Amino acid sequence: MSRTIALLGKELTDLRQNLTIFLPSFIVTIIAVLMPVFVAVVVPLVSGERLSDSSDLEIALEMYKQDPAMRGLDPEAAIQAYVFQYFLVMLVLGPVTSAMSVAAFSVVGEKQARTLEPLLVTPITTLELLGAKVLGALLPALALSVVSMVLYLGVIALVAHAGVFSVLFGVRTFGIIFLLGPLAGMVALQLAICVSSRVNDARTAQQLGVFVILPIPALLVGQLLGIMQLTTPVIVAITIVLVLANAALMWFAIRLFDRETILTRWK
Amino acid sequence: MLTASHLSRRFGDRIALEDVSFNLEAGEIFALLGPNGAGKTTTLRILAGLIAPSSGSVTVDGEPMGPRSAPRLRARIGFLTEAPGLWDRLTVRQNLVVYARLYGLSSPERAVDAALERFEIRDRGDDRAAQLSKGLKQRVALARSLLHDPRIAMLDEPTSGLDPESARDVRDLILGLRRQGRTVLLCTHNLDEVERIADRVAVLSRRLVAIGTPSSLRAKLYTPRVRVVLAQPAEPFASTLRQSGFADVTADGVVLSAGLTGTSLTTPDLVRRLVENGASIESVLPEEPPLEDVYLKLLHAEGGAQ
């Protein structure tokens, strides 16, 4: 464990010196925060039309009548709450892209800079090494999750109708931000670690992370089309799938991250 | 101290190493020579427990190297990889502190301070690794590989790509290790370096071609010769030496060269004959072919044998 902490310290120090690596994730987070504000607040303000008058949002109105949490809200606030809930899933993109970038560069970067062999000479075990790599990518992703949630809820408190903040400040939001976000981020970073044990280019490892990113907008679209709702049971189900995927990927990563392979095949 | 017994290693169909055996003794500098692809780095990695041999075994202080014992035995070995492999964005001190912690040293900061002092890089401790010259990076890498005070140092191309001054600094550091009683296994292409510092040499070309001290390898391949510089032309004295029984005598200007093999005659006999015949001698030296010649001859012989 002490060796994992030692290497984790290095990872975090290294990342502090290279904050630009988080720029794309930060931009994605800002866009994810501003998109629903644009849809739920700016467009009605500019067009002078209330969302609750639009026939496009009839589905939302129907749902609002069935949701006990929304019953105290006026129709306009309820639709804003729905929009902000739909777009909540997009906040997962930030931690996922962050974890993916860090993992892809921290593993392939070591490979390219030829810093891995001296590390493997030490008594560190593969599990300790991978643990440090995973935590080194996960901790910034978690920090970004917190930042994105504070931004999101802060913006809602500032610009949305009264009562929307209370609806969003609940278990579902925390579940999406603190369970789905980090778990999806871990899938992305472990995938990046697995891929990077077979490729030499961080970009290749990152590109394959698309497989993790794609389901996130798909969840948003699914909700907008009324195909599915990110209810608490759905969040729990996705969490279970992600936990299993992470366990399987960790198993694969340890096998793929074989010292002999690294030393003799990584060129 | 370290024993390699019948080491072989295959990578798929390719044989990288075949039946290599040798011992490393305490306090010696042992050089592993060989062309590219001869298996030097593979040997080093097997000895350090980084990769397993396909067959054969390694023991460190009598303890066999295996998957379970490797992490513990690696703590007795310092390994300098071919590339310095420093984390560029970290300072020299930060680089070393991480390794001191990875080696589980009780006082990492103090160990790093001592290493910075010992390798004369204290003033560069707060510089980022990226700012260092290649020579300094190599010095830091050497400091890193010896942080945990290992008894065996395995150095892969320690002076590769260094300017002469930096290379000499590294050589001095290696000699310092020997003075401290550590064993140094040096893997290099630099024969001049080997000539200067190695106690024993092994020539590798997938198999072990030869092993011994530089002078014993020379003696195996070349006859001992003496080179005499005279104050006058050497040619008249060449025939005198031939008549006295010296073999393969050559003269070039004021320089005489004579072989001592196949005769009971010695260097003092040669000097006496020359002086008796009126030669004025300026210097007498054993004539040794450079290690490069020995090395190439060994490799050509091995190539012919294969």
Image: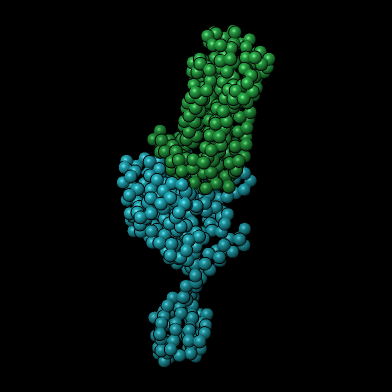
Chain colours: A green, B cyan
Give me the residue at 50% from left, 53% from top. B82
Splitting the image into 4 quarters, where does residue A122 fall?
top left
Task: Return the residue found at the far right.
Answer: A55
Q: Position of residue A131 (x, y in %)?
A: 47, 33
Question: In this view of the protein, which residue sits in the foreground, B166 or B271?
Answer: B166
| Observer-nearest of B263 and B191 | B191
Q: Residue at x 62, y 14 (%)?
A: A52
Q: How many marks?
A: 0
Q: Position of residue B226 (x, y in %)?
A: 45, 78
Q: Please, is residue B281 above or below residue B192 in the view?
A: below
Q: Nearer the viewer, residue A128 or B95?
A: B95
- Camera-side residue of A138 and B304: A138
Residue A60, relative to residue A24: is it above or below? above
Q: Is residue B151 left or right of residue A86?
A: left
Establish if A125 lies above or below B240: above
For residue B261, side relative to residue A80 (left or right): left
Residue in the picture at 41% in, 48% down:
B91
Furthest-bottom residue in this view:
B278
Residue at 53% across / 17% down in the picture? A161
Residue B206 visible at all: yes
Q: Position of residue B247 (x, y in %)?
A: 51, 80
Task: Give percent across and percent down for residue B203.
Answer: 51, 59
The answer to which image quadrant residue A200 occupies is top right
Q: Is residue B65 visible?
A: no
| A122 with respect to A63 (left or right) | left
Relative vertical location of residue A59 with respect to residue B144 in this rendering, above or below: above
Q: Quadrant of the C terminus of chain B?
A: bottom right
